[in-house]
Image (cartoon, grey):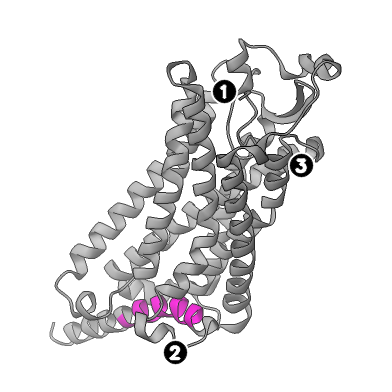
């Protein structure tokens, strides 16, 4: 298994570190010596990951398109539908670029040129950062709604939600730029490859990996955990936590993101010290971790369906109704809490 046999479209694999600093492009003369013969279809793991990628593309593309249609055109625009519409757009864009990865994995060669080599992988990190930033925004929104219901009722508007989403996307784009900067096209053993070129700075690989881990995983999850811990403490003795099961869709989305992205970040950190670990283990782990990360893009529409209603009622309503109910239910839960808290504050003010 050579250095490019695993899915370099997704991964931050640093070829130069595995070749004592040699540049990939210096091997362009080997094209006449080595004749490239793809072996992916002969390997069980590679075939399995190809099948998974195709399923993720089909389910994610269609599912998120459906969510965009429902939340963007069929439902009344609210703060909550703005959150979920933005998440669906992020996942939809990511799934739209999956065919590049599927072709590259099957052919074990990059055929789409230098621009797409830089742009297509950046979409993965745009999806990662935009998704986690939006989940943080939703968590903070829930936090403010529970702890400061009167302020939220007066200032929690669609315009503010749209501005917040726009800023989150700008930040996600900024965090995705390093992928485009360090991505490059070269030649290796007679094949054209799209790889990460971290030779410009000796510590650039480690800086990029650690920054992505902190900004795209650890820090956002600390914020989410803090927000939800305070929310649970505040609502622990209220009737809402016993009957309404508030925020269950959001909780499922956060859990899915954590489970899907954790293996990817773990193996990316291990790959920084690749000399200490078995190459085949790292290669397989990075492949599987990337596929799990991609799977998060089709899980969200599924969660909207199966978290929206009780199990017995799922089979009595259409898929559209389930999705619409899932996205609207969180808004109703928050609105009920805001109304109840506002009424309690008004009653209390009459006794002062």
Front-lying residue, 220 or 343? 220
Q: Earlier in the sequence, mark 2 or mark 3?
A: 3
Q: Quadrant of the C terminus?
A: bottom left
Task: Identify the residue position indicated by label 1 in the image.
Answer: 204
Residue 144 in the image, given as x and y percentages of width and height:
34, 65
Quick check: 69 above or below 279? Answer: below
Quick check: 156 above or below 319? Answer: above
The magenta-colored residue range is 322-336
Q: Is residue 321 left or right of residue 249?
A: right
Image marks 2 and 3: residues in contact by CB distance under 8 Å: no
In the orientation shown, which residue stands out farthest toward the right?
32
Residue 138: quarter of image: bottom left
Task: Identify the residue position indicated by label 3 in the image.
Answer: 116
Report the magenta stretch's main SS: helix
Q: Earlier in the sequence, mark 2 or mark 1?
A: 1
Secondary structure of residue under mark 3: helix
Secondary structure of residue under mark 2: loop
Task: Identify the residue position indicated by label 2 in the image.
Answer: 316
Q: Is residue 34 visible?
A: yes
* 333 within the magenta span: yes
Residue 110 in the image, given as x and y percentages of width and height:
76, 36
């Amino acid at each position: 298994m050579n250095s490019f046999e695993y899915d370099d479209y997704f991964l931050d694999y640093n070829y130069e570190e595995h070749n004592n600093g040699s540049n990939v492009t210096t091997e362009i003369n080997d094209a006449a010596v080595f004749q490239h013969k793809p072996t992916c279809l002969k390997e069980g793991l590679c075939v399995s990951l190809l099948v998974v990628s195709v399923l993720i593309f089909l389910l994610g593309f269609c599912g998120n398109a459906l969510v965009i249609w429902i939340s963007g055109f069929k439902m009344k625009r609210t703060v909550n539908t703005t959150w979920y519409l933005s998440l669906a757009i992020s996942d939809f864009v990511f799934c739209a670029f999956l065919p590049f990865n599927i072709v590259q994995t099957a052919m074990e060669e990059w055929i789409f040129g230098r621009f797409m080599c830089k742009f297509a992988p950046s979409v993965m990190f745009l999806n990662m950062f935009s998704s986690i930033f939006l989940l943080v925004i939703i968590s903070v929104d829930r936090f403010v709604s529970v702890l400061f219901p009167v302020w939220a009722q007066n200032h929690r508007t669609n315009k503010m939600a749209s501005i917040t989403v726009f800023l989150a996307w700008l930040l996600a784009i900024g965090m995705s730029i390093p992928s485009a900067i360090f991505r490059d096209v070269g030649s290796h053993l007679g094949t054209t490859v799209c790889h990460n070129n971290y030779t410009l700075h000796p510590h650039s690989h480690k800086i990029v990996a650690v920054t992505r881990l902190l900004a795209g995983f650890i820090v956002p999850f600390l914020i989410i955990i803090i927000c939800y811990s305070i929310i649970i403490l505040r609502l622990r003795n209220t009737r809402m936590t016993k009957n309404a099961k508030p925020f269950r869709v959001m909780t499922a989305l956060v859990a899915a993101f954590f489970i899907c992205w954790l293996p990817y970040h773990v193996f990316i950190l291990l790959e920084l010290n690749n000399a200490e670990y078995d190459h085949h283990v790292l290669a397989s782990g990075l492949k599987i971790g990337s596929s799990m990360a991609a799977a998060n893009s089709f899980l969200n529409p599924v969660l909207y369906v199966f978290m929206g209603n009780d199990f017995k009622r799922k089979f009595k309503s259409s898929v559209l109704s389930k999705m619409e109910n899932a996205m609207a239910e969180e808004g109703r839960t928050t609105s009920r809490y805001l109304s109840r808290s506002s009424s309690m504050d008004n009653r209390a003010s009459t006794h002062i």
